[in-house]
Image: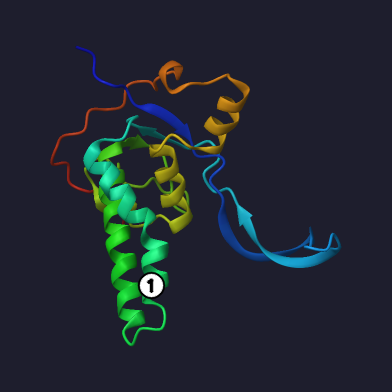
Amino acid sequence: MAKPQPVRVLMDTCAVPDGTTMTETQTDAQGGEVAVEVPGVCFPHEGEWADILPGVRIGEMHKLRLIQELGPAMAAAEGEADEMAQTVQLSDDAMQQMVGLLSKRVVAWNITDDLGEPLPQPHKNPAAFDDLRAEELMFLMTAVKGETAVEKKAAMNGSLTTCSATPPPPSPTLPDTAPSPSRA
């Protein structure tokens, strides 16, 4: 009986804010052009990848639903006396759910931090995600659901399906209780 093989997701298109702003021309509702300040982005993971187990399990679907309900739950907290406390708790709960799910589905990666240092391997290691930005977590969550920009474009062109995706080369076997490497 064959087990599902991880699918390699390229991190090249993962955009994160770079602290700059750019002026962009957009069309307003009346058809006129208006200059808008937009945050600048960079792509810090060019040439990097993550190996992700395809498919979503029932328990993971429940976690995904909780994460997707974050926006409406935060909106419901608006104007409440304890709005800030509710918002912080909702965000923390969603982040814990997301990292827990990712640590089970992302089995290997070659992702580095902003200084080019390799991050600890992610499989069964939620702490490995601590140095990622929210945009990077969302990129990985999107990939877990099979919705990266590359996959969407390929699906529209009919050139890639989940079933025909080439599995990555074998990743090193990670013990179930691998300690997190020191990042001194």
At x 30%, y 51%, the residue is 99
- Residue ID at (23%, 47%): 125
> Looking at the picture, how far across and down is residue 140, in whole percent?
42, 44
Residue 68 x %, y %: 38, 54
Asked if residue 182 shows in the view, the reply is: no
> Residue sitting at 39 percent across and 20 percent down?
167
Q: Which residue is mark 1?
A: 76
Residue 51 at what x, y percent from top left?
37, 32
Q: Residue furthest bottom?
A: 81
Q: Residue at x 37, y 61 (%)?
A: 70
Q: Determine whether, in the image, residue 20 is placed left or right of residue 144.
A: right
Figure quadrant of residue 26: bottom right
Whether residue 92 sits left or right of residue 17 in the image: it is: left
- Considering every residue shown, the one lying at the far left of the view is 177
Instruction: Tell me the amino acid under the disc marked 1.
Output: Ala
Looking at the picture, tell me which residue is in the foreground, 81 or 26.
81
Taking 153 as reference, is 45 left or right?
A: left
Query: Which is nearer the eye, 140 or 11?
Result: 140
Left or right: residue 1 versus residue 27 is left
Q: Which residue is at the far top?
A: 1
Q: Quadrant of the N terminus?
A: top left
